Amino acid sequence: MKKLIAIAALLAFGAAGAALAGTRVEIKDSDQARAEATMHATYDHPKTQVVPNDQLQVVVTDDLIMRSCCMPPHLIVGGKITNVSDRPIDYVRLHFAFEDRNGKVIHGESLYNHHAESLSDDAYIQKILNEKPHFEPIRPGQSDTFRFSIPCIELPTFSKVELFSNDIKQ
């Protein structure tokens, strides 16, 4: 019986050795590691965290830094809002809070949902466009979109971004 167990163990180790023989561990040289760290620091950022709201479902579909040869990098955050309440929502003002490592808000931005964007126009823009601020209500179950863009050079170094959607007009 002991011989049978010994033979089975030898066969198991032999099969495992053959299976792991092709395994390779990639060792990165310091230049490659440095390049990857630079790439991470250049193109990565803290992703936007949505603060839940019982009247509105907010889904972030885009959260990236857009780079171009012709302008400074921009933080782009876009998404979809859906009315999950039983009443129409006239418009939503979304607030972005940029926080430092200690949780202190160091910068804030806000915008309206797509169908209410004209609410943010100042009097001069209204005169040029010859229109008054207006909005299309979001009925229960309906959705709308939003898109936020800000040059990264205008943002301080931040560790967290929260998106609040509790500024709702019904």
Image: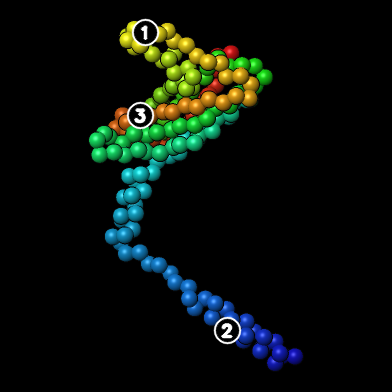
Location of residue 112 in the rendering, given as x and y in whole percent from the top left corner: 46, 20
Q: Which quadrant of the figure contains the N terminus?
A: bottom right
Q: Which residue is mark 2?
A: 14
Is the Cβ of the residue at disc 2 closer than 8 Å to that at disc 1?
Answer: no
At 53% from the left and 15% from the top, the residue drawn is 136
Task: Judge by depth and name the residue closer to the eye, 70 or 159.
Answer: 70
Q: Is residue 3 left or right of residue 167?
A: right
Location of residue 37 in the rendering, given as x and y in whole percent from the top left corner: 34, 52
Task: Judge by depth and name the residue closer to the eye, 138 or 122.
Answer: 138
Q: Is residue 71 left or right of residue 101?
A: left
N-term-proximal mark, 1 vs 3:
1
At 31% from the left and 60% from the top, the residue drawn is 32
Q: Residues within 10 Å of mark 1 (few under 14, many from 20)?
A: few
- What's under tag 3, amino acid-wise? Ile
At 31% from the left and 36% from the top, the residue drawn is 73
Foreground tag (1 vs 3): 1
Q: In 3D space, how far apart are the residues under numbered discs 2 and 1 (Cα atoms)?
A: 82 Å
Q: Name the disc covering residue 150, or none.
A: 3
